[in-house]
Image (cartoon, grey):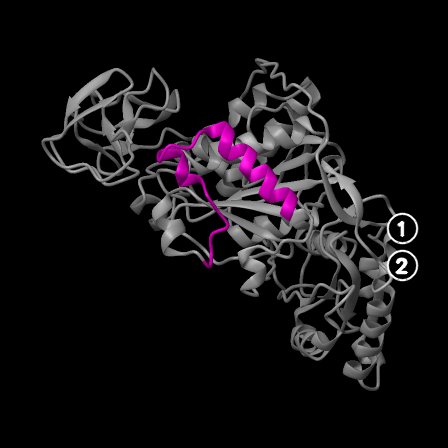
Amino acid sequence: MDGALRIRPEDTVAVALQPLATGEAVEAGGARVTLIEDIPMGHKLALRDIAPGEAVIKYGHPIGEATRDIPAGSLVHTHNLRSLLRGEGTYAWRPVRPRLEKAPPASFSGYRREDGRVGIRNELWIIPTVGCVNDTAAALARAAQRLVGPGVDGVCAFRHPYGCSQLGGDQDATRQILAGLCGHPNAGGALLLGLGCENSGVETILTRMDGADHPRLRALVCQEAEDEIEAGLRLLEELAGQMARMSRTACDTRDLVVGLKCGGSDGLSGVTANPVIGGFSDRLVARGGAVLLTEVPEMFGAETILMNRCEDEATFQKTVALINGFKRYFEESGQPVYENPSPGNRAGGITTLEDKALGCTQKSGAAPVRDVLPYGGRVKTAGLSLLAAPGNDLVSSTALAAAGAQMVLFSTGRGTPLGCPVPTLKIASNSGLARRKPRWIDFDAGALLEGGTLDGLADALLSLALAVAGGQPVRSEENGCRDMAIFKNGVTL
């Protein structure tokens, strides 16, 4: 393994692929430097002298500007590099026409639903309309575990604190997310559990539902039941009996919707895990599937790459509105648009939001952007769509599930046990993490630095995703990590 990687020929920095020591001679992409300080794995080293105010180039794009002289062979990080990001921007469409060769669909066995969508699990979900009945939902889930068996893959209750005391966009978003989960194809049966006096009650959520989903949905208003546990169990038993008659049938990649997510990233995420997911994404799109990219603040600094891949000007304009809308949200809240890399990100070698975004967006591969979805929106087309949601891991993962993703591919450099309502498949950016946390990690993209190839790993990830679609559990499912969260940015009454 080489000591450092120059990602693009025009880059003025390289990424350390292992810890490098002062005095080592490092060669990367035709540049040779002697290190004048230690460089931790995943961090950046200057390949030439960089002057104050000069743009620092990584991934072929600026990731910020130098705040002082940066000699060749020195560490480039928060002490000498700052973001160039500002507020809302004016953009021009400069279309790039990516072409992906179509490939024959690949097969798996799934559950074909009444509306034509496919579930990759046949689970019984309990979805509270309001946080007041969270404990009731949890009690029902515990009591209903006896129903797990042939036809019922699992019973899950998804707790959240909202559904009442909300106004405007927050209230609408809660309703959309809950309706999206109630009708999700991975739920062979769903119990919508209400209290009875909340703003977003059972009837309100039902108005957001597609009628084709109702055969798999039951509803209970706790204030109207003499014994809500007894009444809820009767409905769950009814659903379980119905689910026992469901079986897997032949499906293919045209039936798959996969969400793309990263969290706990490090400086190798944009070198290994995210490019491997990008290779997977292109393979799924070529086979007729759909992929969803979200985490809008983690597009800042890389947004023009996505904009120029929009398949038409209308989609470009929607992407501009998506980006500027999130920047406006930051500004109206009195927060800077560039404050995103977490302490863990920075410890792992990510310095600025541009640095993070240029690595993050590689999960989308090279496919054209075909659609832009609002928060709470649902996927409407095959290919690559952008979904409005913040960078927060659980909020954005839940949004992907509510939009119709049957699974989420989640890259990480530092590790996380998180799981969302759908199978959450963890891809490690480095083999050390995969070895250290085998109960968290499903796939080791760090193998790219140890003799693996991008094509080989992308093919292997596609094979794993198809196995998961066919019923193979992921680590987060085995560990019982199943949570949800809803985006909130307004007034609470």
Main secondary structure type of the part rendered in magenta? helix
Residue 55 position, x and y percent, is 31, 21
Question: In this picture, which residue range is highlighted in magenta?
Answer: 439-467
Query: Left or right: 236 with respect to 52?
Result: right
Q: Nearer the viewer, residue 180 or 365?
A: 365
The CA distance from mark 1 to mark 2 is 7 Å
Q: Which residue is mark 1?
A: 212
Q: Which mark is residue 215?
A: 2
Q: Position of residue 275 (x, y in %)?
A: 48, 31
- Residue 372: assigned label: none
Asked whether residue 270 is drawn in magenta, I would say no
Q: Is residue 269 visible?
A: yes
What residue is shown at x 83% (from left), y 74% (from top)?
237
Residue 208 at what x, y percent from top left?
A: 82, 52
Q: Which quadrant holds residue 215?
A: bottom right
Mark 1 is surrounded, within 10 Å at the Cα level, by few (under 14), some (14 to 19) or many (20 or more) other residues, namely few
